[in-house]
Image (cartoon, grey):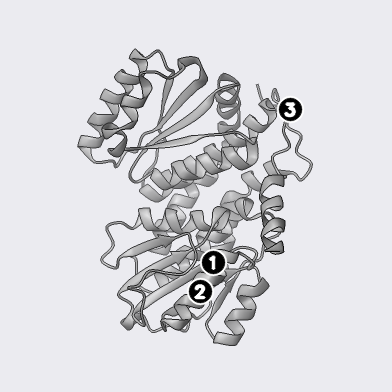
Amino acid sequence: MSGQIVVLDANKMLEKIHDFPNQLEISWKTNWIKKLPIDTKKINHVIIAGMGGSGIAGKLGRELFLGSKTPIDAWSDYGCPGWVDENTLFIAVSYSGETEETLDATKAAIEKKAQIVAITKGGKLEELSLTAKFPIVKIEYDSSPREALGWLYGSLLTVLVKSKAVDLTEERYFKAHKELKNAVETRSFPEKAQQLAMSMANKVPVIISVSPLTAVANRWVTQINENAKEFALQATLPEMCHNTIVGLEYTIPEKLQFLYLESTSAFSRNILRGKIIHQIIEKREIPVIPMTMRNESPLAEQWLFIYFGDLLSYYLAGVNGADPSPIESINFLKEELKKA
């Protein structure tokens, strides 16, 4: 089955997808030994700002540590919330350092005297750090932002640990890393991802998720958008129980494909809701595929699902006859904004 789907991969994205464990390992080891000049005693709130392929790292971190004593928020917009102050740790994540919204949010955080850390490869965000004198964690990886998630997320996790905002040990980090690395080395995921991609031809994917996998589902949707050049939707439990299921009454069943990301650590009532929703969707003759990952921790579960989702989006690009790397619409939008 391997190699059955031919992908027009001019920039070798598949190599970057398989490099996910290596990115996570190097980013942690690189940043763990560096000092982070922030006052951890003053931090009572964390906000992580970022957009697109950079911003997903903040969403993943927020959801992974929902049980943390220190509140963590993710922000994807201009400006920043009114409650940001000198007791806030503001983490700006921009791979390029040129993200317009994140730069604006960082400037707003400077005005509010927040403690700031930037995670970036350079650009205007690095220039801003030199002017405003806040530390940066440098990304040492050449790719598009969405291909550098291991570097972005691994770096973010080291910042969160060093700021004492979360409880994550190096041992737990690398235990999860070992699970991911084993999955990549056994090469069982690519064949399964190809099979699923072929079954999804000419269908709109709808990714059902439950905490702690809603941010992962968001990653799946955006990767399908950017890599496969395909429209996709996200439906989250328990919220979809109050609206989405009614919207299936007059839909076209053969145009939809539901994928349900099931978490081994989900709340019991949400697990029950998922089973009932499965029945409702099947009654409408819409295919729904439950998906689970064997894992020993929520972090490992996140990483395994991310890896599989990235592969799925890659092979969907092949099904669609698309090169996964170009993002012409986004580039056009940026050029038009420059004219304003």
- The reply, left or right, for residue 122 in relation to residue 178 is right
Label 1 or label 3, whichever comes before in sequence order: 3
Disc 3 and disc 2: Cα gap in Å? Answer: 42 Å
Amino acid at the residue labelled 1:
Thr
* Residue 268: % across, % down: 21, 37
Q: Nearer the viewer, mark 3 or mark 2?
A: 2
Which residue is at a point 30% across and 18% down the rendered structure image? Answer: 279
The answer to which of 118 and 187 lies nearer the viewer is 118
Judging by the rendered image, the residue that carries numbered circle 1 is 102
Which residue is at a point 33% across and 13% down the rendered structure image? Answer: 283
Residue 168: tell me if it is visible: no
- The reply, left or right, for residue 304 in relation to residue 317 is left
User: Which quadrant of the view contains residue 64?
Assistant: bottom left
Is the residue marked by circle 3 packed among few (<14), some (14-19), or many (20+) residues within 10 Å?
A: few
* Residue 237: % across, % down: 31, 37
- Mark 1: secondary structure: helix
Amino acid at the residue labelled 3:
Val
Is the residue marked by circle 2 packed among few (<14), some (14-19), or many (20+) residues within 10 Å?
A: many
Judging by the rendered image, the residue that carries numbered circle 2 is 106
